[in-house]
Image: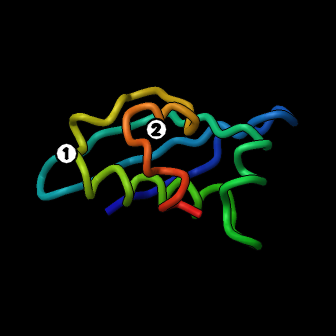
């Protein structure tokens, strides 16, 4: 289960806190999302929280929750997974 909550919005980027719970374990992550990437990659009408939840679904299909960086910007996902942008759109 992935829970995402926006913690701030400085006008240029969102900062979101994500919690991933599987079994008895839990990980926490701080995710930044630029407004530019949000506009380019999110679905029409999709909230930043829902978009980041989809990003985590993408990541969790490819790696364990413990392998996901504790702090990252959404833009770095494509460095590790070149198909990210094509899939997430």
Q: Residue at x 82, y 32 (%)?
A: 10
Between 30 and 84, which is closer to the camera in this rendering? 84
Where residue 68 sits, quadrant-wise, is top left
Residue corresponding to mark 1: 64
Residue corresponding to mark 2: 77
Q: Residue at x 68, y 69 (%)?
A: 43
Q: How many labels does the image show?
A: 2
Q: Where is residue 60 in the image (x, y as percent from the top left)?
A: 28, 53
User: Is 62 situated left or right of 78 in this image?
Assistant: left
User: Is 11 situated left or right of 38 in this image?
Assistant: right
Q: Distance between the residues labelled 1 and 2?
A: 14 Å
Between 35 and 15, which is closer to the camera in this rendering? 35
- Per the image, label 1 sits on a secondary structure element best described as loop
Crowding at dot 2, Cα within 10 Å, few <14 / some 14-19 / many 20+, comes out as: some
Q: Position of residue 32 (x, y in %)?
A: 61, 34
Query: Of all residues shown, which one is farthest toward the bottom?
Result: 45
Q: Which residue is drawn at 40% across and 53% down?
A: 56
- Nearer the observer: mark 1 or 2; the answer is 2
Between 4 and 86, which is closer to the camera in this rendering? 86
Q: According to the image, what is the colour scheme of the structure?
A: rainbow
């Amino acid at each position: 289960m992935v829970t995402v909550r926006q913690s701030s919005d400085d006008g240029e980027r969102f900062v979101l806190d994500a919690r991933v719970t599987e079994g008895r374990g839990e990980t926490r992550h701080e995710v930044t999302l630029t407004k530019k990437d949000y506009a380019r990659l999110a679905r029409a009408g999709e909230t930043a929280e829902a978009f980041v939840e989809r990003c985590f679904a993408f990541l969790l299909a490819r790696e364990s929750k413990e392998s996901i960086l504790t702090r990252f910007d959404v833009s770095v996902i494509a460095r590790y997974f070149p198909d990210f942008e094509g899939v997430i759109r």
